[in-house]
Image (cartoon, rainbow, N blue to C red):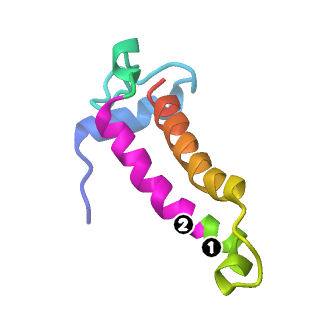
Amino acid sequence: MNRISPHIAENMTQLATESVTEPNRNCAYQVKKCSKAARKITPALLAEALKTALVVGTIIMVINQFEAFEGTMAIDITKAALSYCVPFCVYLYGSLKVRD
């Protein structure tokens, strides 16, 4: 039989009786808001965005330009560029939004 520590049992009881909008004061895991300084675009963030854009962009490019790879059609440069730009921008936006 599993035993629940008194601290966990107290938190569970408190969560059951509190309203959802009020934070749990006894919980050790609390979400902290990042400061404006923490939301800057750093070189590490750009590197991660670039890696993601290369992988996802290549998959999108193969899907959109499959005929060009077969040799039956010419490559559309605009579509090719957007295939990489969109995942890059989405990764940056998502990463910065999560930090809000």
Q: Is residue 22 above or below residue 98?
A: above
User: Which residue occupies the foreground of this view, 62 or 75?
Assistant: 75
User: Which residue occupies the foreground of this view, 8 or 43?
Assistant: 43
Question: Residue shown at 31%/24% (left/top)?
Answer: 26
Q: How many marks?
A: 2
Which element is circle 1 on?
helix
To which quarter of the image does residue 73 belong?
bottom right
Where does label 1 land, which residue?
A: 62
Residue 56 position within the rendered picture, expressed as x and y whole percent measured from the top left: 53, 61
Where does label 2 land, which residue?
A: 58
In the image, residue 57 lies in the stretch drawn in magenta = yes
Residue 5 position within the rendered picture, expressed as x and y whole percent measured from the top left: 22, 44
Question: Residue shown at 42%/49% (left/top)?
Answer: 50
To which quarter of the image does residue 14 belong?
top left
Question: Residue shown at 76%/84% (left/top)?
Answer: 72
The answer to whether mark 1 and mark 2 are in CB contact below 8 A is yes
Judged left or right of residue 4, residue 55 is right
